[in-house]
C-alpha cells in the first residue's frame, strides 16, 4: 500500500507502532499546552509589557483576564471544530486544530509591547489567545477520543491518560527553559525581552509537529462507522444529551481547577504571594510536571483494573478534606520545601483523578458525537473552572487576606467532580 493512500486516512497496518501513533497525536496537544503555560509562567512580565497600569495588582488581573478569555472560546471551538472532527475524521480535524493553534502562538510571540504600538498590542495578544482557545476547544477532545479508539481492549484508561501526560512534557520544557533563562540572563533583560525566548522556541517547534501529525492514520473505529453525523445532526444530539454534557463538565471541574492551580498559577503564587524566588517556583513547577507525568498513566491503568468510579470518588473526597489544611500549612511558613510537598500532594490527587476521568468522559458520551460531546464538556469546565483559576485565586487572596484561599476554589471544584461521578455512574454509560 502506498504512502499516498495511507495519507488519505487508510488505517495503519497492524504492525504499526502504538507508541508512534501516541507521539503523533499528542504532539499538537504538547504545543497548545506549552504556550498556555508560558503565558502563566511569565504573567508578571507580560503584564508589564502589554497591560501597564499604576497598580501591579490591576496589571496582573488584566493579564489573567486575557489568559482566561481564551478559555471562553473553547466551547465555541468544541462545537464547531468538534462537529467537524466527528464528520470528516480524527486525522483531518486534528491537522486543522493545529493550524489554528499555531497561528495564535506565532501572533503572541511577535507582538510588540504597549510602549511600541500602544493599545493595539493588548488587542493582538487577546486575538492570539482567542485563536488558541478556539483551537483547544476541540484539540483535547480529538486527541482523547483518538487514543481511546486506538487502545487495545482493557487498556483504554492507560492509553487515554497520555493525552494529559503530553501536557506535562510541555510543562517540563517550559519550566526548564524558564529556569535556564533565570540563570543565564540579568533580571532586567529577562523582564524586558528575555521572556519572549520560550515563545520563539514554541514557534520553531511548529513545523516538526505538522510533519508528525500529517503522518497520523485514521482510527479503525471511525472508519468502521457507516454514518458520520452532519453538523445539524450533531447539534440535535447535543440538545438531546445536554444532561450528559453538563455532568461531564462537572466531572472535569476538579481536573481543570487543580491543574491550572499547580502549574500555571504556581510561579506567580510563589513569587508574589509567598515571596519565594522565581528559581524556586520554576523548580517546583518542573518537579510537579514530572510527578503528574508519572501519576496520570498510573491512574488510567488502575481505573482499567478496578473501574473508573472508585478512583474518581476517592480522589475527590481526599481533595475536599485536605486542600485547605495543606495550603494553610504552607501559608503559615512559606518555603521551597513546603511548597514542593503541598504541590506534589495535589499532583497525586490530580494525576490519579485525571487518569480515570479522561477515559470516563469518552465512555459516557454518545459514540456518534463523541468528539464534540467530550470537547464541549471539557471546554465548558475549562472556561468556568480552569482558565480563570489564576484570576480567581488572585482575587480570593486579595478579598480574604488569606494566602491559603485558593484551596477554597479547588475544594469546590472537587465537590463538583464528586457530584458528577455519582450522577453519571447511576446510569449506564453509552
Image (cartoon, rainbow, N blue to C red):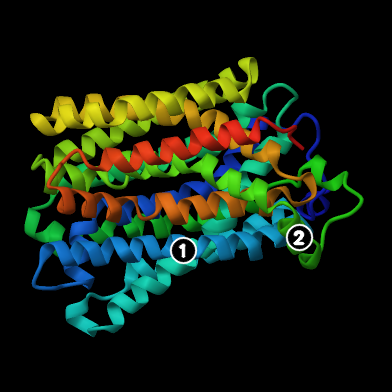
Residue found at x 48% / y 68%: 131
Other-residue count near label 1 (Cα within 10 Å), few / some / many at <14 / 14–19 / ≥20 = many
Other-residue count near label 2 (Cα within 10 Å), few / some / many at <14 / 14–19 / ≥20 = many
Report x, y in % for residue 97: 59, 60
Residue found at x 15% / y 36%: 280
Q: Which residue is mark 1?
A: 72
Q: Which residue is mark 2?
A: 234
Report x, y in % for residue 75: 56, 61
Identify the secondary structure beneath mark 1: helix
Residue found at x 39% / y 23%: 318
Residue 330 to residue 366: above or below: above
Residue 281 to residue 89: above or below: above
Q: Which mark is residue 161?
A: none
Report x, y in % for residue 234: 76, 60
Q: Relative to residue 378, is residue 231 drawn left or right?
A: right
Quadrant housing the C terminus: top right
In the orientation shown, which residue stands out farthest toward the right? 226
| Viewer-closest of 222 and 259 | 259
Q: Relative to residue 410, is residue 151 drawn left or right?
A: right
Q: Relative to residue 102, is residue 234 drawn left or right?
A: right
Amino acid at each position: 500500500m502506498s504512502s499516498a493512500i495511507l495519507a488519505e486516512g487508510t488505517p495503519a497496518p497492524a504492525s504499526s507502532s502504538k507508541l508512534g501513533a501516541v507521539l503523533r497525536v499528542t504532539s499538537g496537544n504538547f504545543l497548545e499546552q506549552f504556550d498556555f503555560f508560558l503565558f502563566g509562567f511569565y504573567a508578571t512580565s507580560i503584564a508589564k509589557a502589554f497591560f501597564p497600569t499604576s497598580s501591579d495588582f490591576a496589571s496582573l488581573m488584566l493579564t489573567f483576564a486575557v489568559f482566561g478569555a481564551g478559555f471562553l472560546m473553547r466551547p465555541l471551538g468544541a462545537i464547531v471544530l468538534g462537529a467537524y472532527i466527528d464528520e470528516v475524521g480524527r486525522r483531518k480535524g486534528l491537522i486543522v486544530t493545529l493550524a489554528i493553534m499555531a497561528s495564535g502562538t506565532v501572533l503572541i510571540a511577535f507582538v510588540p509591547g504597549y510602549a511600541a504600538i500602544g493599545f493595539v498590542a493588548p488587542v493582538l495578544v487577546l486575538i492570539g489567545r482567542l485563536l488558541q482557545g478556539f483551537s483547544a476547544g476541540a484539540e483535547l477532545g480529538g486527541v482523547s477520543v483518538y487514543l481511546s479508539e486506538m487502545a487495545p481492549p482493557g487498556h483504554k484508561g492507560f492509553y487515554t491518560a497520555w493525552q494529559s501526560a503530553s501536557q506535562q512534557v510541555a510543562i517540563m520544557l517550559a519550566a526548564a527553559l524558564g529556569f535556564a533563562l533565570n540563570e543565564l540572563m540579568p533580571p532586567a533583560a529577562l523582564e524586558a525581552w528575555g521572556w519572549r525566548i520560550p515563545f520563539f522556541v514554541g514557534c520553531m517547534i511548529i513545523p516538526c509537529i505538522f510533519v508528525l501529525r500529517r503522518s497520523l492514520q485514521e482510527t479503525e473505529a471511525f472508519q468502521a462507522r457507516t454514518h458520520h453525523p452532519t453538523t445539524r445532526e450533531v447539534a440535535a444530539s447535543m440538545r438531546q444529551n445536554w444532561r450528559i454534557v453538563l455532568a461531564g463538565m462537572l466531572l472535569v471541574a476538579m481536573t481543570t481547577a487543580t491543574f491550572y492551580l499547580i502549574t500555571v498559577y504556581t510561579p506567580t503564587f510563589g513569587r508574589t504571594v509567598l515571596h519565594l524566588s522565581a528559581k524556586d517556583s520554576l523548580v517546583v513547577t518542573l518537579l510537579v510536571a514530572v510527578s503528574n507525568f508519572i501519576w496520570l498513566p498510573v491512574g488510567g491503568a488502575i481505573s482499567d483494573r478496578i473501574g473508573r468510579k472508585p478512583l474518581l470518588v476517592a480522589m475527590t473526597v481526599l481533595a475536599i478534606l485536605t486542600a485547605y489544611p495543606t495550603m494553610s500549612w504552607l501559608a503559615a511558613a512559606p518555603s521551597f520545601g513546603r511548597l514542593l510537598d503541598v504541590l506534589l500532594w495535589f499532583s497525586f490527587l490530580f494525576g490519579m483523578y485525571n487518569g480515570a476521568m479522561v477515559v470516563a468522559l469518552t465512555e459516557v458520551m454518545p459514540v456518534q458525537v463523541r468528539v464534540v460531546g467530550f470537547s464541549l464538556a471539557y471546554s465548558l469546565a475549562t472556561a468556568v473552572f480552569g482558565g480563570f483559576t489564576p484570576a480567581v485565586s488572585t482575587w480570593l487572596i486579595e478579598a480574604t487576606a488569606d494566602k491559603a484561599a485558593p484551596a477554597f476554589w479547588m475544594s469546590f471544584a472537587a465537590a463538583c467532580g464528586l457530584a458528577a461521578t455519582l450522577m453519571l455512574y447511576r446510569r449506564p454509560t453509552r
